[in-house]
Amino acid sequence: MSGGKGTVLLCEDEDNIADLVRIYLEEESYRVIRAKTGGEALDQAARQAPCLLLLDVGLPDMNGFDVCRVLRERGNPVPVLFLTARDSEIDKVLGLELGADDYVTKPFSPRELTARVKAVLRRSAPEIAVAAVAVGDAVIDAARREIRLAGQNDPVFLTAKEFDLLWFLAENKGLVMSREQILRNVWGYEWAGETRTVDAHIRQLRKKLGDALPIKTVWRVGYQIAEH
């Protein structure tokens, strides 16, 4: 365990869940420190300066929502990913309004959680110059905001929002992104019950890109650019 990718603060009072999460994150070269209560998590967040806080909602002393609220009131910008057995819409809305970056419902796949951690850290990292990225039979150039398809000389014309949506899916290649996550990260909405605007933009992307860059629909969940 080198901790080369940074320190993740895991606030989880169930030992079996905490041990499993630690194993998977340490395999990815993250250093993991553990807190079992909200108060301990607040102390560790101040002293250890973690790159991410994995925060259980149901804690013995205070709930995770209150921990997140206190962090933000103190001006601590650490990305927060909630772990919770709650899956109601009102809980998701509350978590996002408090400044959480993502929300994973128990039971969850440890590999999926690890992928979510990486995605949150990518989104929260300082912007740097990004090289062109090859996805499928297409090359996406973030600097020029262009996409070129194999065998074509001219770039495909995309609107600004179409490109932002495509880039978000490409950054999270292999993950299924819900419509709400897309709205939050591409449009900047914290929450919206109406998600047809996402579907409309996906239809336009498919029309323009065809089979060169297939965007998969995951029924009742969202969209994905699959890894090959």
Image: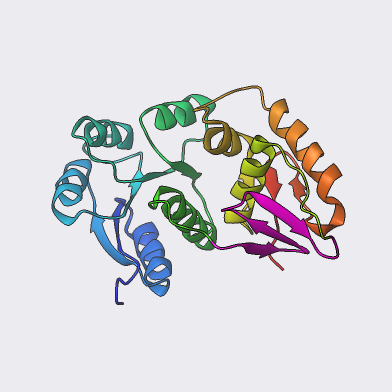
Q: Taking 75 as reference, is 209 left or right?
A: right
For this orientation, the residue located farthest to the bottom is: 1
Nearer to the camera, 150 or 185: 150
Q: Residue at x 37, y 72 (%)?
A: 29
For this orientation, the residue located farthest to the front is: 153
Queried whether the magenta region covers residue 143, the answer comes back as yes
Residue 104 in the image: state x and y as whole percent: 49, 45
Would you place residue 81 above or below residue 21 in this image?
Answer: above
Magenta stretch? 131-152
Queried whether the magenta region covers residue 134, the answer comes back as yes
Residue 146 in the image: state x and y as whole percent: 68, 51
Q: Residue at x 37, y 71 (%)?
A: 26
Quarter of image, res 223: top right
Residue 66 in the image: state x and y as whole percent: 27, 31
Q: Taking 87 as reference, is 136 left or right?
A: right
Nearer to the camera, 155 or 225: 155
**Where's the N terminus, which quadrant?**
bottom left
Would you place residue 136 above or below residue 82 in this image?
Answer: below
Quarter of image, res 157: top right
Nearer to the camera, 109 or 127: 127
Residue 5 in the image: state x and y as whole percent: 35, 67
Q: Which residue is drawn at 57% across and 37% down?
A: 186
